[in-house]
């Protein structure tokens, strides 16, 4: 799926996005004690057309977590909907190229000096 399709979904209203989502509610983990252990307040949403999955368990209210999921989904669609940045080719400066060639030349001389005298390789 290209960035244009994501951009199309990012422009949709929240209600239209919510219609395309499969919603799962579950018990949140982490701190919160008895309130967390008894209520299904965490929300996981999967956007059907794109397959993006977002989860929210910030609040103890399922309704607030649903709206938080939709905000996260919209933000992810906007992020994926941006066109990729153009890559600007850079040129290696002449000075750097010359320095690299000089280093290679001196390494060759260093290794040549390590050889046994009289060996012509």
Image (cartoon, rainbow, N blue to C red):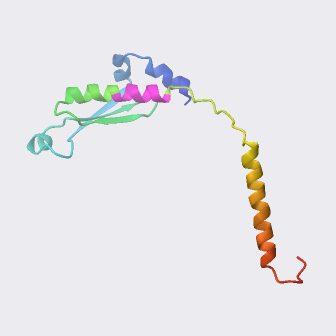
Q: Residue at x 57, y 30 (%)?
A: 84
**Quarter of the picture holding the N terminus:** top right
Which residue does the image show at 37% across and 18% down from the upper left? 16
Residue 62 picture location, percent across and down: 20, 30
Q: Inspect the magenta stretch and tell me whether residue 73 lies in it.
A: yes
Q: Is residue 30 left or right of residue 51?
A: left
Residue at the left extreme?
Answer: 34
Residue 113 visible in the shown view: yes
Q: Is residue 49 visible?
A: no
- Residue 66's spot in the image, x, y percent? 26, 28
Residues drawn in magenta: 72-80
Q: Quadrant of residue 108?
A: bottom right
Q: Main secondary structure of the magenta part?
A: helix
Front residue of 112/79: it is 112
Place of residue 103 in the rendered image (x, y in percent of width and height, measured from the top left)? 74, 59
Q: Is residue 87 above or below residue 27?
A: above
The quarter of the displayed image where residue 43 is located: top left
Residue 63: x percent and y percent?
Answer: 21, 26
User: Does 101 lie within the magenta span?
Assistant: no
**In screen coordinates, is 5 left or right of 102?**
left
Name the residue located 46 percent from the left edge and 30 percent from the top edge. Answer: 50
Q: Quadrant of residue 118?
A: bottom right
Q: Is residue 106 above or below residue 42?
A: below
Question: So how many labels did they put on this image?
Answer: 0
């Amino acid at each position: 799926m290209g960035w244009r399709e994501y951009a199309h979904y990012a422009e949709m209203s929240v209600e239209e996005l919510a219609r395309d989502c499969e919603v799962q509610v579950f018990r949140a983990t982490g701190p919160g004690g008895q309130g967390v252990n008894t209520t299904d307040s965490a929300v996981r949403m999967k956007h059907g057309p794109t397959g993006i999955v977002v989860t929210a368990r910030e609040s103890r209210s399922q309704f607030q977590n649903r709206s938080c999921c939709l905000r996260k989904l919209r933000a992810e669609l906007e992020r994926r909907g941006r066109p990729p940045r153009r890559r600007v080719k850079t040129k290696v400066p002449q000075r750097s190229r010359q320095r690299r060639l000089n280093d290679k030349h001196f390494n060759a001389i260093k290794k040549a000096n390590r050889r046994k005298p009289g060996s012509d390789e």
